[in-house]
Image (tube, coloured by chain):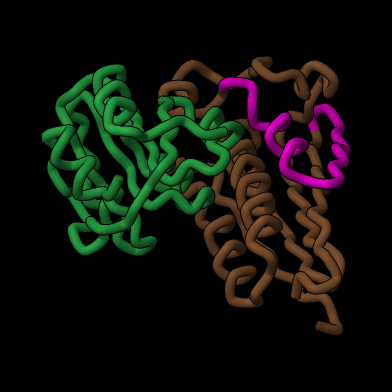
């Protein structure tokens, strides 16, 4: 493929009904590029969970997706409250989401664990009061593009 | 089992996707928590849920689900149906409860498949 493709999305933190539009767009782009369907599925699930998290917890932010020959990299950056205890946040079932978020089908403490489950690498950088940046990578096989 | 057959045994209504009625499915997942669907849906291509908001359709889209069955008489709004149309996801609505819906489909040979 040569030069990596880079796409940036602004995530609106106000509108829950629009959450997922960026993930949908990335999924379509990957399909058009002929990326392996298992990698598309992993990327779509992980990015969608991340996108939902940005709306629920951080009032939106920015997602940058870099598609190169060997991997899909997603960088999710927000200016939210930060994650006080990453180890706890990674436990399935642990959630700090408001009850109304649960009534929308999320906030069950599966977001971060799902993001880890469906990616090959995940790194969390967080500063309390300043924001969180999560970098996730899904590897592509050499014949993936 | 085709979507059409599911519609018949569940006394369900097609809200969208009658042209998709011949699609065949073997595995089904049911939940109201979309994070559980994302985590455990595996190879399932049909989603049964009582949750009714646009994120249900988004979740189905991420997982390449071909049919959503809304239970307990829940009816998606036009915005949700437009989203489903855009992604070619069939939408059925039944008045059965979730347990009954799952039981009827299980009796007819469908299985859960993580």
What is the x, y in percent for residue B100? 25, 19
Residue A33 sits in quarter? bottom right
What is the x, y in percent for residue A85? 83, 19
What is the x, y in percent for residue B14? 16, 48
Residue B82 sits in quarter? bottom left
B108 lies above or below A36: above
For residue A25, side relative to residue A17 (left or right): right
B69 lies above or below A45: above
For residue A105, side relative to residue B77 (left or right): right
Chain represented in green: B
- Residue at x 30%, y 17% (from the top left corner): B99
Q: Is residue A134 magenta?
A: no
For residue A54, side relative to residue B12 (left or right): right
For residue B65, side relative to residue A4 (left or right): left
Q: Nearer the viewer, residue A76 or B27?
A: B27
Q: Is residue A117 magenta?
A: yes
What is the x, y in percent for residue A98? 53, 19
- Residue at x 43%, y 49% (from the top left corner): B65
Residue A15 visible? The answer is: no
- Residue at x 83%, y 63% (from the top left corner): A71
Magenta segment range?
A108-129
Q: Quadrant of the N terminus of chain A?
A: bottom right
Q: Quadrant of the C terminus of chain A?
A: bottom right
């Amino acid at each position: 493929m040569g030069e990596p493709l880079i796409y940036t999305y602004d995530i609106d933190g106000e509108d829950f009904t629009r959450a997922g539009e960026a993930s949908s767009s990335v999924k379509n782009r990957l399909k058009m590029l002929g990326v392996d369907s298992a990698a598309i599925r992993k990327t779509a699930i992980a990015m969608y969970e991340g996108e939902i998290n940005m709306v629920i917890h951080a009032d939106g932010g920015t997602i940058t997706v870099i598609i190169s020959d060997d991997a899909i990299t997603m960088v999710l950056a927000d200016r939210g409250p930060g994650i006080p205890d990453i180890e706890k946040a990674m436990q399935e079932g642990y959630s700090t989401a408001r009850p109304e978020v649960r009534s929308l089908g999320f906030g069950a403490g599966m977001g971060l664990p799902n993001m880890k489950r469906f990616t090959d690498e995940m790194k969390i950088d967080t500063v309390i009061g300043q924001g969180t940046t999560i970098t996730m990578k899904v590897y592509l096989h050499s014949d993936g593009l | 089992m085709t979507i059409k057959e599911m519609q018949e045994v569940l006394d369900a209504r097609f809200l969208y996707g009658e042209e998709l009625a011949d699609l065949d499915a073997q595995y089904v997942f049911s939940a109201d928590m979309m994070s559980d669907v994302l985590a455990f849906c595996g190879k399932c291509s049909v989603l049964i849920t009582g949750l009714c908001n646009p994120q249900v359709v988004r979740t189905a889209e991420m997982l390449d689900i071909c049919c959503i069955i809304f239970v307990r008489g829940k009816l998606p709004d036009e915005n949700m149906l437009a989203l489903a149309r855009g992604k070619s996801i069939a939408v059925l609505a039944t008045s059965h409860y979730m347990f009954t819906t799952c039981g009827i489909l299980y009796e007819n040979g469908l299985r859960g498949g993580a």
